[in-house]
Amino acid sequence: MNEIQITQDTTITSNAILNEGLYSRWTSYIDAMPKTVETYTRAIKQFYTYLHENGISQPKREDVITYRDYLKQDHKPTTVQSYLAAVKLFFRWTAQENLYPNIAEHIKGAKLDTEHKKDYLTTKQTNKVLGAVDRSNLKGLRDYALLTLMVTTGLRTISIIRADITDIRTAGDDTALYYQGKGHEEKADYVKLAEPVEEALRAYLNAREDKDQTAPLFASISNRNSNERMTTKSISRICKESLIAAGYDSDRLTAHSFRHTAATLNLMNGASVEETQQLLGHKNINTTLIYSHALERAKNNSEKRIAKAIFG
């Protein structure tokens, strides 16, 4: 097998192993959405930079382990896991192509906490956030429609960004928004729009100048890119500003909190785990069970019973 030659100008597309042709084979091997390919490519570049900076031209298994521990110093467990997953997939490919041994096989990643890193909003808090939105202008109408959609459907930010006006259709006897789910290439999934949500969306769309049905459902209103598709960053900012305006300024409350809120309030109001799994588009029900387990603990009043036994 060849050596991996690490030089100062080594990149994912120009080093001895990953020239243009082999790079194409590597990305084909990943066989994922463009965004995932981009993420894995960036992770491998980072790994190559680490190898170069440490004078490693023929990495061994212990070098990958040291790299993992190096990442743990300044990165979150989820980031370490993501970067290491790319490295493991890369060396699985190099071994398959007879380019370099699979030195990353069976190396454990970072230990992930199964609890959610973000908080959810209570019903009262949700009403306060929505009530704080000024709907007297186009921005307010848009932001209110956006927030109500997020908090009632649990849609991911990326799915909202990809949505077009024409994706508002019918499903049975309901108005629905069809969206492109995580890992999907078509808008085959949908969420039902409750009457207040549909009304908020219609009010926003009626106030917009752009009546093109193929236009983005949520569009920018800035002078620089008016009517263009919004970004994850802009939606995250709207969510954060709305939370702060309602008095909820916390690092644990972000755009993702609206998805958590939808799942939690659904379960609290009688939905089954399976219904919530379908709502959120979770492939693995264990992911949804995290919400259920958190609620079970919240309802567990053991401490109060013990205190009552002691103190009366």
Image: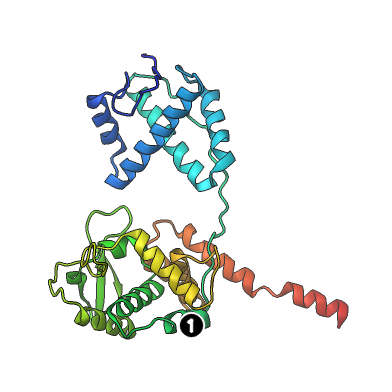
From where the camera sits, is residue 246 visible? yes
Above or below 259: residue 28: above
Amino acid found under the numbered disc labelled 1: Lys
Residue at 43% over, 65% down = 255
**Residue 16 drawn above or below residue 290:** above
Q: Is residue 76 above or below residue 171?
A: above
Label 1 packing within 10 angstroms: few (<14), some (14-19), many (20+): some
Question: Which residue corresponds to the image point at 37% horizontal and 83% vertical from the top-left?
Answer: 134
Viewer-proximal residue among 37 and 11: 11
What is the x, y in percent for residue 60? 50, 20
Residue at position x 37%, y 59% in the image: 233
Nearest the camera: 281 or 74? 74
> In the image shown, does 282 or 1 lie closer to the viewer?
1
Q: Which residue is mark 1?
A: 128
Quarter residue 116 falls in: bottom right
Q: Secondary structure at mark 1?
A: helix
| Residue 89 appears in view | no
The x, y position of residue 216, in whole percent, is 21, 66
Q: Residue 228: x percent and y percent?
A: 21, 63
Give x and y (percent) for residue 182: 33, 56
Q: Quadrant of residue 219?
A: bottom left
Q: Residue furthest left?
A: 212
Quick check: 121 left or right of 172? right
The quadrant the C terminus occupies is: bottom right
Quadrant location of the N terminus?
Answer: top left
